[in-house]
Image: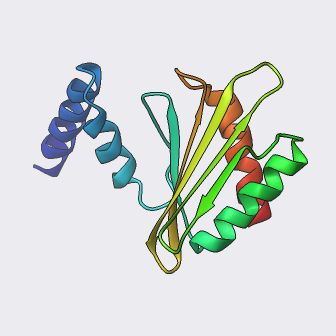
Amino acid sequence: MFKVLGRAALLLVIAIQLSGCPAAVFVAGGAAGAGGIVWVKGKLKEQLDSPLTKVHEATITVLKAFELPVEKDMKDKLAAKVESRFADGKRLWIDIRSISESLTEISIRIGVFGNKSRSERILRKIRDYL
């Protein structure tokens, strides 16, 4: 019985993803638990087990390590937004949102359509600094 239900659920998720519904990606990512990386419409997202302030500080440190200029840096207790630009002219947007005191969602987008490999490299480095 459980085998059949599991297969049916998997087929449903696959069918929804193939239809282009972004909510399905969140459902599949949420099933893996906090910390799962999700790529949705050109954005790389992950929930980190760190407070917003630490994630923001790590983000600024990583941009400096990659020699990327911080063009915009806005932060309050609930959210932060950091913008930069690569040498090739592509823009970088990093949005950080507090979910709880110790859980933060980070979203990274590069250029209009996104660049998954660059986004993953930046996210990996941010995690290293945390």
In the image as oriented, which residue stretches furthest toward the left?
Answer: 1
Residue 106 appears at what percent x and percent y?
54, 54
58, above or below 103, in the image: above
Instruction: State left or right for residue 21 relative to residue 78.
Output: left
- Report the number of numbered marks: 0
Rendered-image quadrant of the C terminus: bottom right
Residue found at x 28% / y 22%: 20
Residue found at x 73% / y 39%: 121
67, above or below 33, in the image: above
Residue found at x 76% / y 56%: 60
Residue 40 appears at what percent x and percent y?
42, 34
Instruction: State left or right for residue 37 relative to residue 90.
Output: left
Q: Between 67 and 129, which is closer to the camera in this rendering?
A: 67
Residue 112 appears at what percent x and percent y?
54, 22
Instruction: State left or right for residue 37 relative to residue 71.
Output: left
Colouring used for the render: rainbow
Please tell me in which quadrant of the rendered image residue 83 appears.
top right
Q: Between 20 and 77, which is closer to the camera in this rendering?
A: 77
Q: Between 91 and 49, which is closer to the camera in this rendering?
A: 91
Residue 13 appears at what percent x and percent y?
24, 34
